[in-house]
Image (cartoon, rainbow, N blue to C red):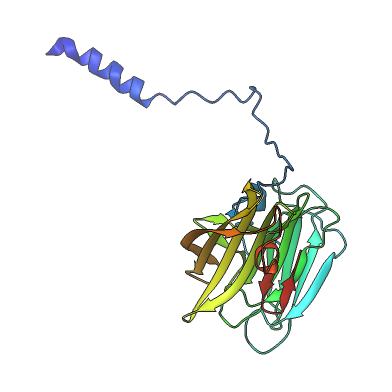
Amino acid sequence: MRRLVPVAVALLLASCAPAPSPDLTREQPQPTSESAEPSPIVVSSSSPAAIAAPSDRVHPTFPLGERLEGAQADFDCDGRADQLDFYPIAGSAPIGLNRLARLTLASGAVRDLALSGMEGVSPLIGIADVNGDGCDDAIVTLGHGASTTWTTFVVYDGNDLRQAEEEGKPVMFLFGGSVRHGNAIECRRTKDAPEIVVRAVSDYTTELQWDTVEDVHHWSTKSHLVLWSTSRSVIAVSVPYAMPPDTARYWGISCGAVKMDQ
């Protein structure tokens, strides 16, 4: 038994030795980004460039440019007008985040949210109650492709200014399109449940048929969506490449007073 003691001591010393340090001189991979337009058939998707800042107050450690746009509305349902403003982030910012949404409540409290955006594109599409809580929310542009606009919702949940999320990721929905495909967004209430309905349509299968997909999303909280149902259908047309009826249903956005057709 005495002969085993040195071996046990050696093993004990080895287990206490510090782990080797990572090689910090090795070149680390750098993030990349692409500006390609999403596939026109996509009904909804999450954009890695649209990740909200983890804090509700980003009173910036980076400088802001001149105010881009703003609007007054009642975001906290206290009956008083609040101010929502958008600024470009002029200095170094988290990857993909180049705009700041700043909500100044009538009470004087300020809440900030970092977002992605595209230079030369107006950040604010309009104001509407998108989640059914009776308070105003913002419909915001993240960017656009050749024929579609990339859209998200910015809501005040009672504590924080947040970008709408689904499955733990910020959401991005599309509207617009071309003569061969379309995307649309509708805010509606069914059986007392507020919903976001997202549609996609295309005639890629045949020139006499439009293939449609409709996703219905329910709000689980003021800022979180859950995919509730998905349905597929076909719209037949008698003339090749003829547009389906009610094109605003498949090419536009309809949320409260915010109504836009392609």
Quarter where residue 174 is shown: bottom right
Residue 220, placed above or below residue 234? below
Residue projecting furthest to the top: 3
Q: How many marks?
A: 0
Residue 196, placed above or below residue 189? above
19 vs 250, left or right, is left
Residue 245: image x %, image y %? 67, 67
Is residue 59 shown to the viewer in this render?
no
101 vs 203, left or right, is right
Q: Which residue is drawn at the image coordinates 71% and 47% (left, top)?
A: 96
Residue projecting furthest to the left: 1
Quarter of the picture containing the C terminus is bottom right
Is residue 162 shown to the viewer in this render?
yes
Quarter where residue 149 is shown: bottom right
Quarter of the picture containing the N terminus is top left
Residue 222: image x %, image y %? 54, 72
